[in-house]
Each structure stands twice: as C-alpha cells, then as structure tokens.
Amino acid sequence: MNNVIIVIPARYGSTRFPGKPLAELQGKPIIQWVYEACKKANCGEVIIATEDERITSAAASFGAKAVMTSADCQSGTDRIYQATKGLGADYVINVQGDEPFVQPETIKAVVELVKNDDKTDISTACMPVTDADIINNPNHVKAVLAKDMRALYFSRSPIPYKREKTPESEKAPYYLHCGIYGYKIKALEQFVKLPVSPLENLEKLEQLRALEAGMTIKSALINKAGPAIDTPADLERAKEFAKNL
C-alpha cells in the first residue's frame, strides 16, 4: 500500500538543551516549525513522538497529533519505531525535531528515494558545503558518498582528509549530513534490534550502526538547509537565520 508515516522524535529531556523542542523561534516552538514543514511535504501522516506531556500539550495547541513513548528510548530511531509499531506503515520517515528549517522538498526527496530504490534500506539527505566553520565543527556531521550516492561513512571529523592542497582538491566539497532518514519498515525493524556498534559508540552517530551491519544508506543531494539546533547558542544563530527568511 506504500503507506508513509512521518515521525518527529521530540525529547524534552535533552542533556545539552533541556526543553529544546518548546524553545521559541520567531513566536513558535521549534517543534511547530518542523511539523509545519512535514505537513507541507504532503507525503503521509505526521506524528510527533515524545516522552513528555508538555510536548503533547504544545502539539495539541497547534493541531498536531502526538504520541507518548517511553522515556527509556535510547535514540530517536527507537522512539519512532515505538510510535509506529503496529500502524502498518511500509515506510517510516524520521525528521529530527531540532531541524526547524528542513525543507518540504528535502522530505519529499528522502521519501521518493527510499520508496523507489530497491537497494536502499535507509535514505537520507546531504548538502555540499565549503564553509570551514561547518566542516570543522563536530556538531555538524559530514558524509562520504560513493558515485551512486551510497554512504560510505559519517563522521564528526572533516572527512575526507585533503592530503594535497591543489586547485582541484580545494574545490572538492564536503557533504553536510542533514537530520532526516527514510526507512523501509523491514530495515527499521532490523535496525532497532541491533546492538550499539563500536563505531557508533566512538562517534555517537547511530547511522554508523546500520553501516557496520551492512545496511545500505543512500543520500539525496539537496542545495538548501538551515541550521539545526543542538545547543542554546545554536538557537541564537537560528534566530538570526530566521530573520532573513
């Protein structure tokens, strides 16, 4: 039936930024920005998955459906699996709740990739970047992609390392990984049963668990993305970015 459910995991108890989903940005909570982008994509039902009733109450205030999930979920992926278990989805899209500027076109591209590519277990999105501040910031995850857009690796480090400084190497972009995933339901079910992997534990990046298990992640290339919000300082940068929208 090709049933798509978009889930926004929104954890109130963030270590680096408690209450982040409800932090205000241009008069709206961050989670509302994400929800409205998902609705505009028009790809399927949109659900907010949280462990805190303050977020379900906020969701109700702007007309969103929210479901309570366990506070013991170890990751956003565990949370989206719990929220969609038994709903009969063929594809589950994870749009992270700290990406207020995610574009509806990006969501559509991730949905189409996972639906139409038989070899893709998980789809995602990346954007070419040349900004050194982004490249060298460990909060901004970089991806190495093969010619067929298959992800070879993700890292907080600036990869690939440019050993020789030449005009060609200087022009070669890095790929910024954006906080969105599309799962075939069997891939999601496989992923949540896997133990935390060694590389995942080192980098604190759960997508490495999938790569280490031999799963295929492919990326859609996008050319527009705003700042994600990991810390209160990121929120201040997001406020400046939003002024120019």
Image: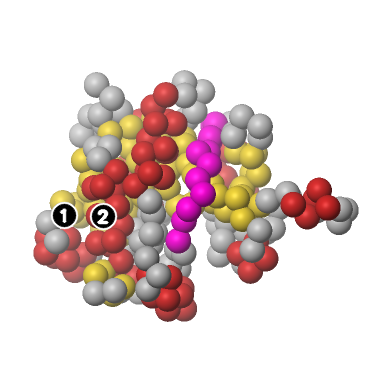
Residue type for callout 1: Ala
Name the residue located 34 percent from the left edge and 70 percent from the top edge: 20
Rounded to the nearest angstrom, the CA distance separating label 1 from label 2 is 8 Å
Is residue 71 at least partly visible in the picture? no
Name the residue located 42 percent from the left edge and 38 percent from the top edge: 110
Position of residue 242 measured from the top left corner of the image (x, y, whole percent): 37, 70
Residue 10 position by quadrant:
bottom left
Q: Earlier in the sequence, mark 1 or mark 2?
A: 2
Q: Is residue 1 above or below residue 223?
A: above
Numbered badge on residue 170 = none
Q: Is residue 120 above or below residue 221?
A: above
**Residue topped by disc 2:** 35
Q: Secondary structure at mark 1?
A: loop
Position of residue 160 measured from the top left corner of the image (x, y, whole percent): 73, 50
Residue 116 position by quadrant:
top left
**Residue topped by disc 1:** 64
* Depth check, front residue: 91 or 39: 39
* Depth check, front residue: 152 or 189: 152
- Quarter of the image for the N terminus: give it: top left
Name the residue located 46 percent from the left edge and 35 percent from the top edge: 122
Name the residue located 15 percent from the left edge and 51 percent from the top edge: 65
Question: On the rendered structure, is 90 left or right of 193?
Answer: left
Residue 238 position by quadrant:
bottom left
Tag 1 near tag 2, CB within 8 Å: yes
Position of residue 86 measured from the top left corner of the image (x, y, whole percent): 22, 34
Q: Which region shows up in magenta?
A: 215-226
Q: Secondary structure at mark 2?
A: helix
